[in-house]
Every structure is written in structure tokens, then in C-alpha cells.
Amino acid sequence: MQKKFFRHLVQFVFPALPLIAASGAERTVPASGDSSDISHAIDKIAPALVRIHVVSIEHMQGKETKFETSGSGVIITEQGHVVTNHHVAGRARRITCTMASRDEIKAELVGTDPLTDIAVIKLIPEKKRTFQTAPFGESSKVKVGDRVMAMGSPLALSQSVTMGIISNTELVMPEMYWPFNKITIDGEDVGLLVRWIGHDADIFPGNSGGPLVNLAGEIVGINEISLGIGAAIPADLARRIAREIIENGEIVRSWTGLEVQPLLENSRVENGVLVSGTIVNSPAHKAGIQSGDIITKIGEYTPIVHFAEELPVFNNYIVQLPVGKSIAVSLIRNDTKKKCSLTSIQRDYLRPETVEIKQWGMTVRNISLMAAKEMKRDSQDGVLVTSLRPGGPCDEARPSIISNDIIVKVNGTPVRNIHELAAATSTITDTAGNGVPVLVAFERKEEQRLTIVKIGTREMYDYGYEVRKAWLPISVQVLTSDIAAHLGIPGKSGVRITRIYPDSRTENSGLKVGDVITMLDNERLDVSEPEDVEFFNARIRDYKTGSVVSLGILRDKKEITKKVTLVKSPQPSREMKKFRDNNFEFTARNISYFDRVNNDFDQSLKGVIVEIVDQGGWAALGNLAVGDIILSINKKPVAAIAELETTMKSIEKMKEPYAVFQVRRGIHTLFLEIEPDWNKK
């Protein structure tokens, strides 16, 4: 019961994410000894608060998907560096910040660290300026019962302040809820290094990344999660991570391959940490450290790990060891003291960056050291497939490539990483065009497989056009026996005219809606079931365009004959010329005859109709919708696909920061400002 409850409780509890609410109703501010302290603290921090609006990316179904979310942050340097959460801005493609003054300023991602859920962004004002900052306090001095304020922009609203007290200064996820006791981001266990500061100041979706502030107006934490109580990353850790990101753009950590846990209750050792295991061929394994050893000293550091709350302290020491430098280790093995030397290597993230490769219809990433070990591979060479586009080249290959396959060769050439795969892809498609058969070698667990993948971006309008058939510009329904009986013509069969298309010869042929066609060139139409309607249409298509046919008709129970000339069938919508824009991620086509008649478009309407808007694409984020009629782009009329293609290629060439689409949607006309990303890798 407890495990089930906890699983629901921690299933993405980050308050920045959409549709994830924190528990707890809004409370009143608790009484304070001096309200002026509260006002003073707010006045110090409020000018440095920012609301962060982010266009982030996820990768699913073989493509990059963009979505919008919001969070909070606080300015920590006069140059405009803002600290926030990784889960707010770590996967950002575009960032806009709303200042306390309500000005909007663009920002860029400086660096991010999923292991501590800290990211740093930098404001990019149009004119150089100095920003007001908020000072860091010392989270190590925070005590249970201290009054604190959670500041930020919950629900993407204006700046907000809630107040509460510190309830826990060493908050960790309880072991009793295993295996649901980890909060992971991009595969990284945040609790490995973070002991959260627990508090009861209300935080809601959008508060993530905002500061937890003491009454001295100092940042003592960065709010991250809500578990009924709020939890903030301690300021001492956040400040160190932010500083390293600002200085180096990344976090460099040591990795030893040690896996540890608190000392067992029956341990006779006073201080130390229990080695639960070592990763095979890791530095710890090579140093001779074994499962069951108790480490009593590393360098000058004496670990004291009796409880889960003390593990992050040990882990933080280990990851800060100098990479590549030998360090002495003292340990106890079976009551015998031993010494060894340990030389760490640089730690990489469990999940490297994921990218989309459109020509293959898949998303991929490089293989991290730990991922390779978990897959029991001796090498990190290869490209890991993370998702596939249904109906894309890899999905249609036989045998098809699936998620978690590892591509190792293309046309016999080894592929060690994403860069080499992209280079090989570019060479193949640049010289041979689209739909090129490529021999791909890939691993699936223990199997070594081969397949042929036809790679390349397919053009959207290379369709085989149907030969124009004869057409009678009417719509019909089958006259069923029940309908015939109710119309007073029992026993009759044929098709009833339901519509006569405009702008055609048929309009002046004397046919009327409600006429029942019973004969075609003196041959009876023996149809009686609704699905038989195609029989009549097929008969018409058997004639040549321009043929004159005789129709036997029942009108008001009277039999009459009408002669009509068959015309060439209009081009169907599926055959209209199309254009696909990969920068803005939409497809449009020319307006067909049936578009006009079925939607009652005026003949004077000039434009192109939107057929596909990629879910999570830039056009979707700009609110372009399927069925919209694009009238103009950046004030240039778009009367047909040729003009759309010319305009969009011009925008791409000039790398224009945005495009204003004038569209017709139903009876309404509106303007949509759509911003692409010209810096995409």
C-alpha cells in the first residue's frame, strides 16, 4: 500500500511541468516577529526574479517534438546569469524571460546538470545593461523552524510569494519505498548528490527553479519538487554548480565505479562506508576494492555513513576528486586493515544528448560508459536508436530497425558515434539523392543483424497522377427499398441525386436534387444497398470524357429522360502539388476543386491549404492548424504552392527570425507569428 501510494506521489513531481499540481491548499502567512523583515527580504529578491517561458524538446516516435512550459529563476550575476532547474531549461530550444518590470528578454542556455537538476541561462538584452542580483546565503546554517519564503511564478502567473518554515534540512527519499524511492531526470538519480531542504511554503507548477529565501533576503535553496511538502536544492550545492557552469559551461566529475551503502546495524566499525559492489573494470575494481569492504578513509577524508541521509555527503566528495589523480584508500576487509590506491576517470552522463536524423526517420544518441556496461558491451562505439517514426525508412526496412538497436556500420563503414553517422548520411544523400538503399549492420542484444534502409527525405509532391476520368458533377445516394417505399415508388431501384456541383455543365442540364436516376443509356441501375453507390460512379468512369449519356429519371413519380455531357474529373486533393517546409515543420498544398465546393470557398480566394502540422513543431507552437488557408507570409501574397515555396526558401536563405502568416480559419482571418530555429544542430 505504501509503495503504491509513493509511486503515484513521485511520478514526476517537478512543479515546472505542465498539468502537475502540488498538493496542499493555499495558506495564510504565519505570524512573524517583525513584518518589516519580510518586506525587506522580498524587496531584496523580487527585482531579480524572472519568469521563464521555455520551448523545450523531447524525442519520440522518431522525431524531435517541441512543447511549451514555464518555470522560475533568479538572477545571480550582474551580467544576467539566471539559476533555475535543469527540468525547466535543460532541454530548451528557445527561452524568453519576463522580468519583475514585466519586460521580456530573450535568454540562452549556458549549461545544465541533470544530476543536481541545476541549469544556468543568460539574459540577452537588446542593449547592454547591468542586472540587479539576489545574494546566496549559506544553506548549511539553515535550521528546522526557520521562516522561509518560496518566490517565483506559479502557473506562469505574475510573481508570487508564499511563506512557511523549514521542516527538514536533510530530506532524502526513504528506502522503505524502494524501488520507487528515486527521482530521476534524464536517467540521473538526483538524490545521489542532493539532500533537499524540506519546507511547507506552498509551491505550485511554475515555481520550479525559483528561490527559497530566508528573512535576510538570501537564497538558501532552489525549489525543485513538491511531495506534499516542498523540497529545495540547498544553496551551497546550487551555488557551486552554477559557478562551475558559468566558468566552464559544463560540470566535470570523477567516476570510480564504487557503489556504497550505509554501514549495517551489526557492523563493529565506528566510522566508514560499506562497499556494496564495484562496476567491472572500473577504477575501484582495478584498485582491488571488493564488495563487503568498509572504506574508512579516502585521502584525508573520513567517511561517516550510518544513515541514508549521509550518503550524498560521501558521494559529493567522490565526484569532486581530481580526475586522473591517484588517491590513497584505507579499508577494512574481514576485520583486516588494507590500503590501496584509486585513480578516478571522468564521469559522463548516463544519457548523452538525443538528436533526430530525419533521413532515417529515427532519433539516436551516443552510448555512455555506464550504458555500455549495462548492455554488457566492451565498447561505446555505435549509435543507440531511441525511437522511430512510424512508416519511416527504418520502420519500413525489412527486417526493420527498432528502439534500443545499435547501428554499428553503414555500407560496411564503421559508425562509432552520431557525428560519423550524420557525416555518412550527408555523403550518401548528397551524391545519390533520396530513397537510397543502404546496407546497415546493427546489434540487437546478442545478435549481429543486417538490413537495407532506404534513407532520404521524401518530397511531398512526387505522386503518380491518375489519368483524368469521365465525371458527372453530382453526388448521389443509393435508393434503398425502404426509402423507395416511403417515397411512394416501391420496387424501383437506382440512385438519388443529393447535390449538383457548381460551375459545371450539369448545373444547366436540367437535373435537380431529388431526381432518382433509374437508367443509364437504357440500362437499368439494379442497385439497392448503400455500398452499391460506387457501382454507378464506376459506370460513369467507363465512358470517355465528352461522352453524352442518356439518364432515365423519376421526378415526382414521373419518368423523364435527360441527356448530359460527361466532363473531365477534377484533380483530387491528394494529387494537388504540395510543399513541405522542414524548418517550420508543416506541409501545405494547392486548393482543390473539392476544397472549394465542400467548404463553400469563394472563387476569388487565393492561397494554399495547410495539410499537415507536425505535432510539437515550430508551426504548431505558432498555432498554425490543419485546414488553415495561408493567404500571405510577411505581407507577400501566397496564391499557390510555387509562391509558398519561393517565399519559404527566401526566409530560410535570409535566416529571418520570424515569419508572420496571414491565414483564414473558417470565417475568421488572423495573423500568426512563427519563429523557427536556425541554430539547430
Image: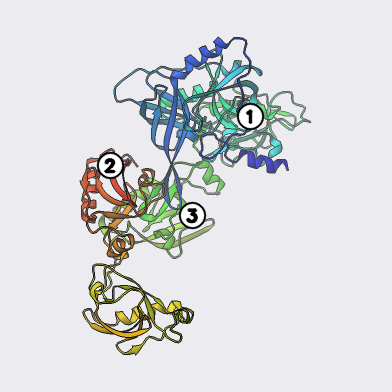
Point out the image quarter for the N terminus. Answer: top right
Q: Are marks 2 and 1 in contact (CB under 8 Å)?
A: no
Q: Is residue 497 above or below residue 364?
A: below
Q: Amino acid at mark 3?
A: Asp
The picture quadrant where one finds residue 650 is top left
Mark 2 residue crowding within 10 angstroms, few (<14) / some (14–19) / many (20+) = some
Q: Residue at x 41, y 17 (%)?
A: 132
Mark 3 residue crowding within 10 angstroms, few (<14) / some (14–19) / many (20+) = many
Which secondary structure, mark 1? loop
**Viewer-nearest of labels 1 and 3?**
1
In this rendered view, identify the residue nearer to me: 457 or 371: 457
- Looking at the picture, how far across and down is residue 347, in whole percent? 50, 34
Q: Amino acid at mark 2?
A: Ala
Mark positioned earlier in the residue sequence (3 or 2): 3
Q: Residue at x 59, y 32 (%)?
A: 226
Q: Amino acid at mark 1?
A: Ile
Which secondary structure, mark 3? loop
Q: Residue at x 43, y 56 (%)?
A: 389
The picture quadrant where one finds residue 75 is top left
Numbered-mark total: 3
What residue is shown with label 3? 405
Between the residue at mark 1 and the residue at mark 3, the CA separation in whole angstroms equals 41 Å
Q: Is residue 513 above or below residue 488?
A: above
**Viewer-nearest of labels 3 and 2?**
2
Between the residue at mark 2 and the residue at mark 1, the CA separation in whole angstroms equals 44 Å
What residue is shown with label 2? 659
What residue is shown with label 1? 229
Mark 1 residue crowding within 10 angstroms, few (<14) / some (14–19) / many (20+) = some
Mark positioned earlier in the residue sequence (1 or 3): 1
